[in-house]
Amino acid sequence: MDEADWIKTGVTPNSYNMRPCSHGGGASADCKLSPAWSRPRSSQDTCVRVADWLPEPRQRPPFSFCLPEVCVDWTMRLAVAALFLGLTMVITRDEEEGDLCLYEALSDTDAVLCKGLEVFYPELGNVGCMFVPDCNNYRQKITHWAEPIVKFPGALEGATYILVMVDPDAPSRSSPKAQFWRHWLVTDIKGIDIKKGKVQGQELSPYQPPSPPAQSGFHRYQFFVYLQQTQNISLHSKENKTRGSWKMDKFLNRFHLSEPEASTQFMTQNYQDSPNYQTPGAGSSEPKDKPK
């Protein structure tokens, strides 16, 4: 129903003409009605507040009508009831459909890692400490999106930082034989930049999107920011040959990197493992997943 529509009760020769009130609901000073009813109430009339037929406040549309107490016969009363029942069903259905896209937080155990770091992807916003929602193809889109915006609001503007992104669950959390899978490694990031969400520095490992293999369960994708104490940080030639089975602890010890200044993580799984995923028809080809 368009907000500019008019509603006519059509019950009496001199009936009310009702127009929408201002946003926010309820009667307002600019809500004007036509003259009062021209006939007296009879025993067959039922006096009701039509506004009482509206859904609960949380389900009401973003507009309301100035509806006084009016006398209507039973036919009109049933018609009004049917009208607003239908409106309630439509709104409720929309709410239920919207509920399919849930932003679920990580468990308390996994949330321990979430400390002062924000990671933003297109459409999703900050994914820190949450599951990537199983809707709108997000779990597939994230495998193609470019690097996220990483923001460390607590960064010291005069300091230098290192950003690390890893998957500790390669190829699966139950059997992490390839732990850690190195997705992103950037050094020499100025504090003034990462404080604003700009990751500019020496990229030792270019960003690689999350690509959990099918039927491997949920993977954690972890981000760490370390205070860089020394210059000329690099990877060994052996480390550069593969991203998997990276000895992250040895790398940190080699450059005297202790506890991270900030960290966070999110979780996702292969989009084909979603209960809402429909197998493509015959003849279609699907990309082959690798443990990442």
Image (cartoon, rainbow, N blue to C red):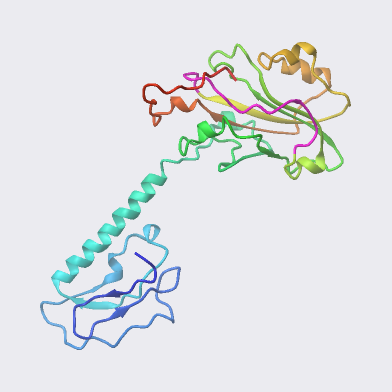
Q: Position of residue 93 (x, y in %)?
A: 33, 49
Task: Name the residue located 26 percent from the left edge and 87 percent from the top edge.
Answer: 36
Task: Name the residue located 41 percent from the left edge and 40 percent from the top edge.
Answer: 100
Q: Is residue 231 left or right of residue 23?
A: right
Image quarter of residue 51? bottom left
Q: Position of residue 26 (x, y in %)?
A: 40, 72
Q: Is residue 99 left or right of residue 45?
A: right
- Which of 287 and 53 lies nearest the eye of the viewer? 287
Q: Position of residue 170 (x, y in %)?
A: 59, 17
Task: Name the residue located 59 percent from the left edge and 35 percent from the top edge.
Answer: 129
Outermost residue toward the front in this view: 283
Q: Quadrant of the N terminus?
A: bottom left
Q: Is residue 195 magenta?
A: no
The residue stretch that appears in magenta: 199-217
Image quarter of residue 125? top right
Task: Name the residue located 20 percent from the left edge and 88 percent from the top edge.
Answer: 38
